[in-house]
Image (cartoon, helix red, strand yellow):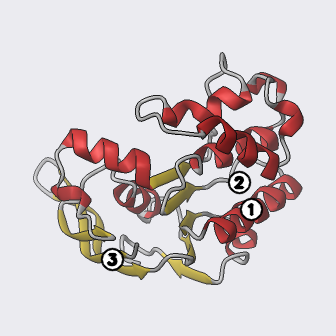
């Protein structure tokens, strides 16, 4: 499932002028590719990730993921496509405090169901080193452990595209290295397309390909 972006643009109307956040972004990635995108705050990195994750719609341009053109789908179909095809890891883990580790990993499956999902969740948690923490709540975990739960959750549906927005931004240096390596290792095992936006040169160096976002252009 190839990711193909051509002349992607995102702008917002403002009083008197148009605020252009992304301009003429072009990108092609194949299964197994991993890309780190660097750039200063306000350069458009996170906006690009939100467009690729279909959390926002582009103003213009072409975006294809495999045979699908997500922005041509209605909202309901787009939500279903996103849930089964795209995984997300955010800077803040976004775990539900009232749910156990295992339940948090299974949350994306509630709307769609499927077979052997609990087995898949347990296997992922074992791969991120949290077998002994399945029944714990997020408040009982360290920051690095919570982010590892988020990584496991992002992979529950075997997504073809995995997006991470500053996944190590709230972690100390040693923990960030551990989580970054884990993300790359799991990506290699799952053969996803992985895109990470980060301020961290140390995290970017773990990726075979790096690009920079400057003034809305990649």
Residue depicted at x 16% and y 45%? 74
Mark found first going from the N terminus, 1 or 2: 2
Q: How many marks?
A: 3
User: Cα distance, mark 2 to mark 3?
Assistant: 27 Å
On screen, residue 184 above or below 98:
below
Q: Under tag 2, what secondary structure?
A: loop
Q: Are marks 1 and 2 in contact (CB under 8 Å)?
A: yes
Q: In this rendering, would 186 be left or right of 21? A: right
Examine the image and state in which quarter residue 59 appears.
Answer: bottom left
Give the residue pinned by disc 2.
168
| Horizontal side of residue 4 vs 155, given as left or right | left
Residue to which mark 3 is pinned: 4
Give the alpha-carbon distance from disc 1 to disc 3, as whole Å: 25 Å
Looking at marks 2 and 3 on the same chain, the residue that comes earlier in the sequence is marked by 3
From this view, report whether residue 210 is shown above or below residue 199. below
Circle 1 is placed at which residue position? 180
């Amino acid at each position: 499932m190839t990711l193909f972006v051509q002349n992607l643009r995102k702008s917002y109307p403002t009083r008197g002028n148009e605020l252009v956040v992304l301009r003429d972004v072009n990108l092609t990635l194949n299964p197994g590719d991993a890309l780190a995108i660097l750039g200063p705050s306000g350069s458009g990195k996170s906006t690009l990730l939100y467009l690729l994750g279909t959390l926002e719609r582009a103003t213009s341009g072409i975006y294809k993921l495999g045979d699908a053109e997500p922005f041509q789908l209605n909202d309901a179909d787009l939500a279903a496509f996103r849930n089964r095809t795209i995984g997300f890891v955010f800077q803040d883990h976004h775990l539900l405090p009232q749910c156990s580790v295992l339940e948090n990993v299974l949350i994306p499956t509630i709307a769609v169901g499927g077979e052997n999902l609990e087995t898949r969740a347990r296997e992922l948690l074992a791969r991120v080193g949290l077998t002994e923490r399945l029944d714990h709540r997020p408040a009982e975990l360290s920051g690095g452990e919570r982010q590892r739960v988020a990584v496991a959750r992002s992979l529950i549906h075997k997504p073809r595209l995995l997006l991470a927005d500053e996944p190590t931004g709230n972690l100390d240096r040693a923990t960030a290295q551990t989580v970054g390596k884990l993300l790359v290792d799991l990506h290699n095992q799952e053969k996803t397309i992985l895109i990470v936006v980060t301020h961290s040169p140390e995290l970017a160096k773990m990726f075979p390909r790096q690009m920079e976002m400057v003034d809305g252009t990649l």
